[in-house]
Amino acid sequence: MTVLTANDVRTATDILSRLTEYLRDTPDPGQVLTLMEPLLDEYTGLPIQLGDTLRAFARAVLDHPDTPHSAALHTLIAELRTAAWQQTDQYDLHYTLDELKALLATAPEPEGCSCR
């Protein structure tokens, strides 16, 4: 596997920031759904990836031979693992996305609108 750098991770968070700014500009809902689909995928989306990353982070810290083990460390590791489960529990947002797509597909056009 290629070695990651902090800059690689910053690039990913920068892209999410750009997406947030884009969404604030009231783009077309169809385009928004297309952009959000990979983020909310039930298997590979952001909630699952972030949960997995937090668990891997906890494991990497806990299992490293130079890590000093203490009650405080184990408390922090437990907090990371709890946060991981909370993130993973958001996997069902893909259902919300599916429902939004269905709702927007059946929404009537406003009177006098030829926007589609």
Image (cartoon, rainbow, N blue to C red):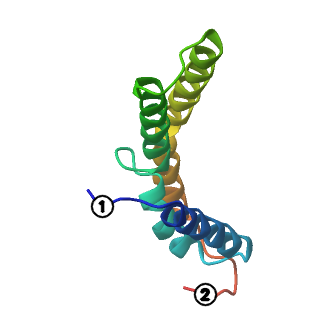
Kindly identify which residue carries mark 2. 115
The tag on residue 2 is 1
The amino acid sitting under disc 2 is Cys
Q: Position of residue 20 (x, y in %)?
A: 67, 66
Residue 81 or residue 96, whichever sits in front? 81
- Say above or below: 91 vs 35: above
The amino acid sitting under disc 1 is Thr
Q: Position of residue 18 (x, y in %)?
A: 63, 73
- Say above or below: 17 vs 62: below
Residue 65 or residue 76, whichever sits in front? 65
Circle 1 SS class:
loop
Q: Position of residue 13 (x, y in %)?
A: 59, 62
Q: Earlier in the sequence, mark 2 or mark 1?
A: 1
Q: Is residue 86 visible?
A: yes
Query: Would you call the spot at circle 1 few (<14 residues within 10 Å), some (14-19), or many (20 or more)?
Result: few
Query: Would you call the spot at circle 2 few (<14 residues within 10 Å), some (14-19), or many (20 or more)?
Result: few
Circle 2 SS class:
loop
